[in-house]
Amino acid sequence: MTMPIPNPFTTDESQYHTILAILRRAPAGSLNLVNWRTKMRRKSSCSSFWTLGMLSVCALEAVMPWRVALAHDDPRNDASPWGIAAGADSGRTYARFTPALHQAGIKWLRLFPEWQNIQPKQGQWDWDGSDKLVANARANHIHLMGIWCYFAPWASADGGTRKGPIKDMQYWRDYVSATVRRYQSDIKYWEVWNEFDGSFYEGRQGADKVKDYANFVVAAYDAAKKLDPNIQIGTCVGPGFLDLVINQVHADTTVPVSSGSGVAEDCRRTDFSRSDKEGHYVYFAVDPRFVPYGTRGLQISILAKRVAPDKTAGMSLCYESAKGYKGAQGYWTIPGDNQWHEYTWNVNDANFANEWGWNFRFDAIGSPNEFLMKKVRVTKAGQPGN
């Protein structure tokens, strides 16, 4: 694969060519060097989703070493913007090229053994390969960027290393915790999976695939931060993949409802027990790259159901318009059964400026009972949904 190498600093052009010259003399390995600014591209998706497990993901950044304020007292940091992403085969050949990386002034190496190599069987840990890699990087004054990726076969859906969903998310948490605990003094920056939005994760597609990734990211973030609050967690998906996410703001106005299936949550419920009445409102913000300022025509949909067939419930929509926040036409009463139902409001005068920290909300102040929500979708008018 190709590793984007951001260069936000003023770098002498000769340094770039010197690095390339040295690397070309290194033994053959799966190494690529590119400049971030030549690779930044975006594709606009026509719909955006907020789905179960999404809520924490939008609060995370794919934090890379050159994008954070470097703590001088943390030896795991380095101000250099130069790094290499090594291919899978480099797990066997890194000792041949890491001296050349050091000579070239390369300070970062994205490489780490897969889960199946570290934990070949449940309860059995094999640290030999990763210990040697970490020791070699340390000896060559190189900082490793770790990757938590792929399945141990015993934890996957089909006994392989790519197909989900995972049998139990606790297996993933234990794997993340074990690696952080062992290499905490050497590795500060980790990525969750490798190209999850591509062919490296199979079995579920569309919004379900986004949901699965959200659950992996949230579980890894929580497990790692418990052991090291300073650790930085990054994602490895294209921006179009994460454009499927709508961020729920003021998420404490709802509560998660889980079926106990091992995922972060199956749906969320309004919380009418709040004394401030905020539990009657569900707030959302949409990435302005998907719905930029001035976008007028939108369809805003929700998938919801009653908490019980005999518990009447419903809602209206309030959204940010060209004339401020206003209510959309139509109050929706959720049908009286135990099924999920979708309702869509058509808006032709939207103007998402995030004036009060949110772009739209579902108002249940007039609802006699709480309700459950499973999915929210925003679609640009005139474009097919995803």
Image (cartoon, helix red, strand yellow):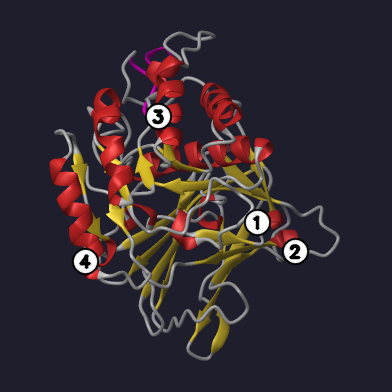
Question: Can you identify the residue that label 3 sits on?
Answer: 136
Left or right of 129 in this view: 57: right
**Which residue position holds label 4?**
14
Other residues around mark 2 within 10 Å, as few (<14) / some (14–19) / many (≥20): many
User: Gap in Å between the C-alphas at discs 3 and 4?
Assistant: 28 Å
Say what amino acid the circle numbered 1 marks: Ala
- CA gap, disc 1 and disc 2: 10 Å
Q: Which mark is residue 251?
A: 1
Q: Residues within 10 Å of mark 3 (few under 14, many from 20)?
A: some
Which of these two is toward me, 174 or 27? 27
What amino acid does circle 4 point to? Ser
Q: Is residue 153 above or below residue 135?
A: above
- Residue 278, numbered label: 2
Q: Is residue 30 above or below residue 302?
A: above
Q: Specify the amino acid type for callout 2.
A: Glu
Q: Nearer the viewer, mark 3 or mark 1?
A: 3
Mark closer to the observer (1, 4): 4
Q: Between tags 1 and 2, which lies in front?
A: 1
In terms of secondary structure, where does tag 4 sit? helix
Vertically, is 119 above or below 384?
Answer: above
* Residue 41 visible to an observer of this rendering: no
Q: Amino acid at mark 3?
A: Asn
Circle 3 SS class: helix
